[in-house]
Image: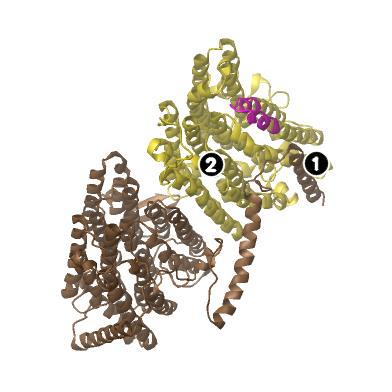
Chain colours: A yellow, B brown
Amino acid sequence: MIADQLPALQIVIPMLAAPLCVLIRRSFVCWCIAVLANVLVLATSWAIFKQVQSEGVIRYALGGWAAPTGIEYYIDSMNAIMLLLVSFISCVVVVYAHETVRKSVQTGKHYLFYAAWMLCLTGLLGISITGDAFNVFVFLEISSLSMYMLIAFGSDRRALSASFRYLIMGSIGASFILIGIGFLYAATGALNMVDIASRIPDAQSQRAVLVAFSFLTIGLMIKSAVFPLHGWLANAYQHAPIAVTAFLAGTATKVSLYVLLRFFFSIFGTNYSFGGMLLNVVLLPAAVAGFVLMSLVAIFQSDLRRMLAYSSVAQIGYIIAAFCLASQAGLTAGIVHIINHGIIKTALFMSVGCIIYRVGHAHSDSLDNLFKKMPFTVCAFIFSGLGLIGVPLTAGFISKFSLISASMERGWWMIGVLVLLSSLFAIVYVGRVVEIMLFRKARTDNPQPTGLREAPLLMLVPMYVLLAVSVWVGISGSATLSVASDAAAALLGGYQ
Amino acid sequence: MSLLAPPFIYMLAALLCPLLSSRHRALLLLIVPVLGFISLLSFSYGHHAVFHVLGFELTFMRVDKLSMIFSIIFSIAALLGGIYSWHVRDHIQQIATLVYAGAAIGGVLAGDLISLFLYWEATAVASVFLIWARRSAASYATGMRYLIIQVLSGVLLLAGLLLHYNDTGSIAFDHLGLVSLGTWLIFIGFGIKCAFPLMHNWLQDSYPAATVTGTVILSAFTTKMAVYALARGYAGTEILIYIGAVMTLFPIFFAEIENDLRRVLAYSLNNQLGFMVVGVGIGTEMALNGTAAHAFCHILYKALLFMSVGAVLYRTGTSKASELGGLYKTMPVTMVCCLVGAASISAFPLFSGFVSKSLILDASAKNSYYVVWFALVVASAGVLSHSGIKIPYFTFFAHDSGKRPAEAPVHMRIAMIATAVLCVLIGIFPGALYALLPYDVEYKPYTVSHVLAQMQLLCFALLAFVFLMRKGLHPPEVRGVNLDSDWLYRKLAPGLMPSIVGLVALRVTAMQDAGVKAVSGLIKRISFLARPGGMLAVSWGVNSMVLVVTVMMLIVLLFNLL
């Protein structure tokens, strides 16, 4: 009985947890509720993932109203991956958040923090699960609004302006998406994704479809922070509360990338998006410029979070470039990198969060010989940093390898070469920090706080759980690849 | 069983390291090579440790005679390095040593290109920590350059192997030959690690910059792994003969005028690699035997020389010829060991270099590469001059520097004596070494003509040195920085001195200058945008972000409407 209602539970649990937090208001209890809800969500998404693997696509009519009238949840292997990724990362980070919230968020407002977190999770999961185009927009707004709020919780006033900038850009993006969906509705008369997809071939010649496509492209590019529309990202990552940065980096952009995949490949179809619409003429140069230039920018950053933020833009460039290959191998590479980068970058931001928690900030010039004081944190940073570079036996290598071999298979040598070049940049920006933390002698003019010690256990444990998963992904390799390849096949095959 | 393959033992031990106290870690550095060696011997010839990963069949243990001799000498080198670095308490160095040695052994045992690549990258990443561990600004910059070049080599290998896989559908690491773009890329990747001419600077740049013990460890593995890879994939590729001949010759001049003795050794390392590369290029059974034997001996005596100069550096704080001299009075053991190493590298009869180098020389003569043979003979004389005489002479004799350092620590002496004994034993009883070689040998190094020819060569080289010293013509040991072709990329650092070369060189330089200027200009321009405050790195205002959105929208619409 419950097994049939899993898709609804996935959304309902966090959605109910949010008001519950607001009603209870006690910081610790709210955190417990958030963790509990998140564990349940994780269990649900795991069950859904297993079910999709064994039985194929799940179609769930919400409230019992069938598709054209009601909202349908449509879960194929791609959605299942996103649900699992989002709920896993959120679960790990929300455990981690406890200490950081106590330290940096105003005491009376903790319950709002957790409520906003739950709403954001609801939104992100909703986007990943729904099969209705307008519903995507609704959930997108839920997640974005709560995310603006979460960012504004940041301890320093710059968080407010960062949040505001994100709000403006996010709203522009969201309205572009809404306009796009509106035009699609006008052209096809449907909001259900499966229906839209089946009517697109007849409506292709209409200008409305074309305009819808353009608006959606730009809207989704803003939301997923594709270069040059990434302007909101660096400040938001740098000034948000540390747990929020980790959460945001691992999930928000990834979910937007999923929507992009869904629209380009399933709804409009590969031939339309990458053949008729010349999408790769626009998207591919942006992606390539993104990963080369942003890796370069990351080298010069002295604030670790800002450095990682630019590196995120670069990594998104990899993912988009992989999509632009528009082949089975390319999509697989992109999806694998969505998973791997989500995990690795979250782990990196968590370790940087531990540093900020103890040191107070994360300027690279005050981390001299940090290894002596915080060995576990630094180790976590190094290992996930190696993953970011793509050193063999880490998760990052699997993505890099599959991306390069996909680009070679397509015959686009330059992409492979540039990916390798920018991974050399990654060595520099990660290596620079590693060298400082391991070898540089502590200077006298820039002392670290006295009594500096390892981060609390409640922060270390979730971080190492995430790290363990990334190591497992790196070593087993084929596990994620086969899942991603299923998802890619589902996307390329279109709706049945 | 296959999980206990030597490289895995090293990696496992590296994982254990953080849990142990520093003394136990030092002990681990001794135990692991022994364990690895035992495990190595327990494998029969053939393929072991085959895993299926990412749809590929990866062979982590391909045991045959060629891979065997390299992994044996790597195990020995790891053990000797472990003894020599007994005093090191820095766990980063200890872990890096284990991972590095394990990866190098794994590299020569890898049966396919992908697992080779895995280890290839692992050596690069692990070894850089031995350089950074010196903890100075200079070693940081050097380490970064080293890392980038090493990873570049791995990247070329990866690109090449993917191309090769696309072409042939096979990832097996057997004879490749220069047949396609893919194999060329792999070749260049190998070449970087093997320090081919013009790709060699990382070696002289980084080895002298590492810690005392780090240099000893570094000198053993990376380049010899590359020699192995060349021998496996490109035996008999003719271009290698000429590359190798050039490699034996050009470092001589740099080594002659260089003042930092560890850098002299780095140049002579490069020159010795040349002999091995020539052997690979000739590619006959005898030549490959020579390459393997020479790699074996070379690792030992080069480690010995680095150890003795390292001991001097450890005691006196300098390895500059101009600041040393007269140390024989207080460091006799180190001096004797250094002399043994010097005699071995100059191929005196009864020392190890003699029995291995003559294999390569004879192979080149037998296959009618007389010019190459002559080049090698000249290079041999050069080796004697800069490594055989210069190193011990300026360190332990020459003018008295007044320094009276204590003898090297006990563990260093043990390591040096053990290495020296091995060098002499191999020289006297070459049969044991020959039995390990990849092909059966019918070779007698101690014939009258061999010994006579070699002694003549050595005597005249000695004579030349004495003559030059007496006449004051020998390049004096002065402080200075010698320009090598690495100024090409180091010039990007501001304030490097202009180079003074001949007319032809000037013209070449002008062209290079223009190229460098164009590249550095481009880099400067991009990094100007990327630096903090540059256009790409600054937080854009909301209005400019919206402007970008509008422009992008226009572009998208434009493309879509057309």
Residue at (23, 75) in percent of width and height: B343
Provide residue A398's location: percent of width, then percent of height: 49, 48
Residue A113 — which label?
Answer: none
The 10 Å Cα crowd at callout 1, few under 14, some 14 to 19, many 20 or more, is some
| A152 drawn magenta | yes
**Residues in magenta?**
A147-165
Callout 2 amino acid = His
Say which of marks 1 and 2 sits in front.
2
Residue at 47% x, 56% y: name it. Answer: B141
Q: Which residue sits at x=27%, y=49%?
A: B4
Q: Residue B38: x percent and y percent?
A: 20, 55
Whichever of labels 1 and 2 marks the residue nearer the N terminus, that label is: 1
Task: Name which quarter of the figure residue B68 lies in.
Answer: bottom left
Overall secondary structure of the magenta section = helix
Residue B209, image quadrant: bottom left
Q: Assign a secondary structure to mark 2.
A: helix
**Farthest residue, direction right:** A207
Q: Tell me the residue at 72%/53% (across/down).
A: A281
Residue matched to label 1: A211
x, y percent for residue A395: 47, 44
Q: Distance between the residues labelled 1 and 2?
A: 32 Å
Judge whether B301 appears above or below A235 on screen: below
Is residue B494 visible to us here? Answer: yes
Judged from the image, the secondary structure of the residue bearing numbered disc 1 is helix
In reply to whether residue B306 is colored magenta, the answer given is: no
Closest to the observer: B104 or B18?
B18
- Please identify the quarter of the rendering in which residue B170 is found: bottom left
Q: Residue B147 vs residue B503: left or right?
A: left
Question: What chain does badge 1 belong to?
Answer: A
Asked if residue B361 lies left or right of residue A417, the reply is left
Can you identify the residue that label 2 sits on?
A341
